[in-house]
Amino acid sequence: MVDRGASALSLPDDWPAHPDPILALNRMGTFDWDLDNGVFHMDAQAHEVFDLRPDEYDGNPATLAVRVPPPEGYRLDGLVSQAMKDGSENYGTYFRIRCRDGTMRWTHTQGYIRRDETGRPRRIVGIVRVATEELAELEQRHEQAANDEARRQQTSVVQLTTAALAHARTIQDVIDVLKDTHGLTHLGATSLVMGLVEAGRIRLVAEGPSGSFVPGTLITRIDEQYPMSEVVRTLSPRFIESPEEFADSYPILWPHITDLHITSAAYMPLIAQARPIGAIGLLYNDRRGFTSDERNVLVALGSSIAQSLQRAMFYEQEKDLASGLQQAMLPRTIPSVPGADVAVRYRSASLGRDIGGDWYDLIPLPGGRVGAVIGDVQGHDTHAAAVMGQLRIVLRAYAAEGHTPATVMARASVFLHELDTDRFATCLYAEADLSTGVVQVVRAGHIDPLLREPGGACRRVSVEGGLPLGLSAEFGQLEYPVGTIELDSDHTLLLCTDGLVEQPGTDLDDGMQTLTALIATGPKDVRDLADRLIDVAEERGGDDDVALLLLRRRVLDAPQPGGRLQQHVAPGDPEALTAARHMIRAAVRSWGAADRADEIELVADELITNALMHTEGSAVVTLRVLAGSERRLRVEVEDSSSALPRRREAGESGVSGRGLLLVDLLTDVWGVEARGGGKAVWCEFVVPERP
């Protein structure tokens, strides 16, 4: 890192010398742009060039937007981006800034692009200087060719304006570009007025100079005697070449605008797809009449504006439609969950009509449990939203039916695979028992959850995952591993889609580290924290939706009935068996049965092992607390075999046969129940009430 003083910033040896001696008379500063971290450092002289105090600039190039008008910024961004892409060593251009007092100042910049050994741009160093005097001198030198230059500038007005309008997405963007585009200034226009055709009337959307609004003209009929009404009616431009002509042609309007000292005006219809969508007027106070070339330029300009305006109108209509569809697919309300504070947020991408398939859901379940879902369907269109809506419904249905988290995810994957679509979806389903704090998590190609402790420390919870929904069914890999998280009091679980994590130019791990740091310093209240996270996503922009769900567990004042936990254990899967043991230990401790923890864990392990050894399928372990005259903890192990277990004599040297004897000795009661095509071996332990 170089010293940040201007004197220490050395320019390359082959830096091109400026041939103009007037350079020495202009203020010049230097900058150093670190492309890796995005910091754009300027020395004190550069601050002066941009008319910024040091405390007004934070090193972020976007902050310069307060001085650089949007059209100039678009042009500069395009120039620098092209130079970096085509391998150029340097670039240079003139641009304008708006000073603190509102005046415009010509500025010149030249940058040298430093690349690493692979050719990737890593840093740009250069100069920025005031060029107003230089351009004035150049104008004097080329006074003889002023007429040709004027014609060239008039011809380029359409190109400059069109380039700036290409970035306009809304009607207001179009208006802002037109007001800021220096092409209009070159044409000599003092200001502009613009109206849109709506339901047979013209609605004024840009009124010219501040305070120049004429009462009664906000909405006018097309048949009224106004210039914009006339050009919309006739579909032809109207050039007014003198104040007298204006007064004679439009006696209703003229008395209200005499204070503007208008000497001439040009009104053009805005026509798109052979129909008028509005009209624009350019007002002048220092000229009379229009040459043939000027009229042609203005007509071409009107055509370009009309196309951009139509795109903006379509954009706003489609964005409203997409946003409404997206919101309709998401839950209307989030249910109140005893024992937890929940916050959800959603941010639409900045892609206009494109709509994402991100979603969240919160599913109340029996026994004090709740299911939290976050997911993202591939693609950004209405089809992705439709698939998302169906997936949300089936996930909710499978969870409400009482299936284990792994089964819920597997069935959802089969559903998506059998759906008439080629889309897949990433998803994370977390089933939390709020009475114990045990959370079972299943991840289908989605990013990991985050866990924040009461003190603010935040960490990423690594959860082994399976393939995304749809793909796991396609490749026959429907066994989803189940991870277990212990959610203590005041701990907050955060689930989000990758739009909150991914940033251009950074990998996922860096994005997760940035997010954990942001959460660690965020407010404790989940709603305030959710607002902060979505505000950061909004400021950052991006072309992906953001969905997030935060769940903070809190201990209820009144004791609650015990919950229910369930874990699927597949044969030959030691990690699933370990996860089941982890769940049992966490539940026993949370349910206040620590005195019998060893007995419960030993018996449960024996029942699980027997189910896996003596049957051909998987085992489903269920733990629950039963309320009654005495509080009992019940363990059930269900398998697909209808054969009942039987007690055998192991003998003095036998290595097996003691399982049921152990169960009989350690439990208070046990038994076997038929379950469809299989059975469930259950046992109960009397445990004291929790204090």
Image (cartoon, helix red, strand yellow):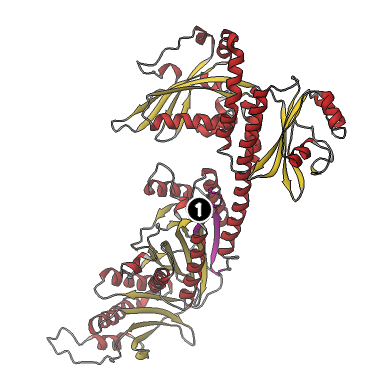
Q: Position of residue 177 (x, y in %)?
A: 62, 34
Query: Please, is residue 124 above or below residue 218 in the view?
Result: above
Query: Please, is residue 12 above or below residue 591 in the view?
Result: above
Residue furthest to the left: 653
Q: Is residue 451 left or right of residue 320?
A: left
From this viewpoint, is residue 518 visible?
yes
Q: Quadrant of the N terminus?
A: top left
Q: Is residue 665 left or right of residue 623?
A: left
Q: Position of residue 354 (x, y in %)?
A: 52, 53
Foreground pick, 459 / 690: 459
Foreground pick, 337 / 237: 237
Mark 1 — residue? Answer: 545
Classify mark 1: helix, strand or loop: loop
Residue at 25 percent of width and 92 percent of height: 646
Query: Please, is residue 624 above or below residue 542 in the view?
Result: below
Q: Is residue 158 magenta?
A: no
Instruction: State the extent of the magenta-drawn residues as a range.
Output: 336-357
Residue at 72 percent of width and 25 percent of height: 190
Q: Is residue 44 left or right of residue 446?
A: right
Residue 575 figure quarter: bottom left
Residue at 55 percent of width and 38 percent of height: 166
Residue 69 figure quarter: top right
Q: Position of residue 3 (x, y in %)?
A: 40, 22
Q: Is residue 350 magenta?
A: yes
Q: Position of residue 107 (x, y in %)?
A: 55, 20
| Kind of residue at disc 1 | Asp
From this viewpoint, is residue 437 visible?
no
